[in-house]
Image (spheres, coloured by chain):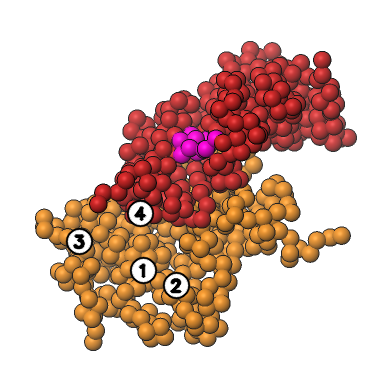
Chain colours: A red, B orange
Amino acid sequence: MPQNPESLTVGELSESELLARIFPRLHGGDSSALLLGPGDDAAIVAAPDGRTVVSIDTQVVDQDFRLEWNNGYRTTGYDVGWKAAAQNLSDINAMGARATSMVVSLTMPPDTLVSWVEDFADGMSSGIRELGAPDCAVAGGDLGRGRELAVSVAILGTLDGQAPVLRSGARPGDTLALAGTAGYAAAGLALLESGTPVDGLNSEQRTLMDTQCRPRPPLAAGPLAREAGATALMDISDGLVRDGARMAAASHTVLDLDPVALKELGVPLQPAASLLGAEPMDWVLAGGEDHGLLAAFPAGVQLPHGFTAIGSVEASAPTDSTGVTIAGRPADTVGWDHFAD
Amino acid sequence: MPQNPESLTVGELSESELLARIFPRLHGGDSSALLLGPGDDAAIVAAPDGRTVVSIDTQVVDQDFRLEWNNGYRTTGYDVGWKAAAQNLSDINAMGARATSMVVSLTMPPDTLVSWVEDFADGMSSGIRELGAPDCAVAGGDLGRGRELAVSVAILGTLDGQAPVLRSGARPGDTLALAGTAGYAAAGLALLESGTPVDGLNSEQRTLMDTQCRPRPPLAAGPLAREAGATALMDISDGLVRDGARMAAASHTVLDLDPVALKELGVPLQPAASLLGAEPMDWVLAGGEDHGLLAAFPAGVQLPHGFTAIGSVEASAPTDSTGVTIAGRPADTVGWDHFAD
């Protein structure tokens, strides 16, 4: 008797049967970088300038996402596929590079629905296309069983003959700038974990929630920053203050944030903050996962499209306890009432 | 009060503290391919001929290994690190390529001992060196929490300007050959799952068990096969018959195995077979995880060092139900009494 396709689980298919359902959905055909695609022991990807930029990132259920949130939202396969693509694309972007390919390893409990996995493949492909990385092919992968759902993606990219932009290059006097959003994903996480049903959210609140589930890193911004002469660049996936401190440490500088710019970043978070009785500035400063891009540019450089100035790079003094300050005061000791009207 | 270092868990350290303990143990310094190592958003690896060979593989606890086996053996971090290196190195070897780097993602329950993770890093580094891939650097990684232990490794390699050897190139008339062992890891798995205490194993049996825990793929064999003109090449990680059928399908041929050669492959498995009342030929034909290398060579070519002839490539007939035969009879229907004395 034919199986109801909606209830078919991965435990009922062989690995090759499952791969046959997934591969046609994975993005790849358009990429000239993919010299040998899935199906052999390994894939072959072009590295036109003789170098490959590489990173790996893993999402695990109940650590990085919940299948069902407190507000009733159910994470779709599409969400997880999109987020896996977005996170990894952002790491390549943050080197000033361009993604050429991904390899994907998906670990699933046997009762995972096949339709969920197909949705995952669709989300990954859509993320690659819609975020603006059409040259990035899914070159291969690995499917396996486990008690908990997990996805690991390794991503490759090319610098197209240019030098990478590291986090260690910021210099005193540089302008500090941000591309993308800050705090949206953290506000979205708070909404997902709140008691407010997902159906009751307005469109601004829903946008914040969507940023947690399907982040939109500003992919064009990395190569643009490199071309504009950025001295340092990094993905602020762990939050502005925490990742900023890493750039400061690597560059032996202090990053001083401008309270006026920070306050501006908090404005779109107000609809969630009001609902939850939260402080937007906590999300702006500590929230990661938007995958915004933090960059330092030489003073006077016209900031490329998508970047907003949010502070400056300063010389570090031996007594500095933190690498990030707000108007000269250590960020980790500044009360957010500092931003009150 | 200082923590007893033996009982320190990963849950008690920050990610950066844990990374600081692992990175110095990871192989990397010797590789001229590593242009930018761990510490930025991504690493940069040389791809001297403008191409990168790439693959990904995941091991999950209780799927791919047990922390404690039925025979009392406890899987060490060293074992898991070694096996992760070996599996991935084998995929590059099986393209006729040479590994240049790995990126590693380790997911761990918070009660995982830090000493276990350090041992993991040591095992990975030793595997890389001892298996013969000194140019392969660990370029970066990702540490995360999960309910179950899992490790994903993506590996990059170079073909050094040569063409890859695919599984699709076997031609009727070719000699079929094997490098490495077949069935050792399966026999070892049977010993691990048996009631015979690990302390009671003799050295031959212990060698088989060790192959399951720390496989030794014949890394030199891939490039040697390519240089000798191999027409097809693949890692038989899923077993000789199953993977052989994949080579046969990709090449539109039949692989005919020589029963005398197969019987020879079974000889070293006898000490485990006798103990467990098992049939060595089951392990030779169906056992994977030794990561032996199956190759087809043009008839008359002198087989490179490490390869043994085990059969021939034949034209396929439309009626063939399987791609692998033994002395002309479908392998999946041949009873192993065929091999009895």
Residue found at x 42% / y 85%: B275
Chain under callout 2: B
Report, in whole angstroms, how far the alpha carbon at label 4 lies from the one at label 2. 25 Å
B317 over A238 or under it: above or below: below
Residue under label 3, please give it.
Answer: B322
Which residue: 74% across, 60% down? B8
Q: CA distance from mark 2 to mark 3?
A: 27 Å
Q: Residue B212, percent across and down? A: 46, 69
Q: Is residue A93 left or right of residue A314?
A: left
Label 4 lies in what chain? A
Do circles 4 and 3 both sit on a common chain? no
Q: Amino acid at mark 1?
A: Gly
Tags 2 and 3 both on a single chain: yes
**In this rendering, do the residues under marks 4 and 1 share a single chain?**
no
Q: What crowding class fits label 2: few (fewer than 14 Cα within 10 Å), some (14-19), or many (20 or more)?
A: many
For mark 4, what is the residue?
A: A12
Name the mark on residue B287. Answer: 1
Q: Is residue B329 left or right of residue B80?
A: left
Q: Which residues are magenta?
A: A73-84
Amino acid type, mark 2: Leu
Above-or-below relation of A204 to B302: above
Question: How many numbered discs?
Answer: 4
- Work out whether disc 1 and disc 3 sit on a shared chain: yes
Residue B98 magenta? no
Q: Quadrant of residue A201?
A: top right
Please provide percent x and percent y for residue B290: 40, 67
Work out whether residue A269 or residue A49 is closer to the camera in this orientation and state it.
A269
Label 1 crowd (10 A; few <14 / some 14-19 / many >=20) = many
Residue in the picture at 32% in, 38% down: A24
Magenta stretch: dominant secondary structure: helix
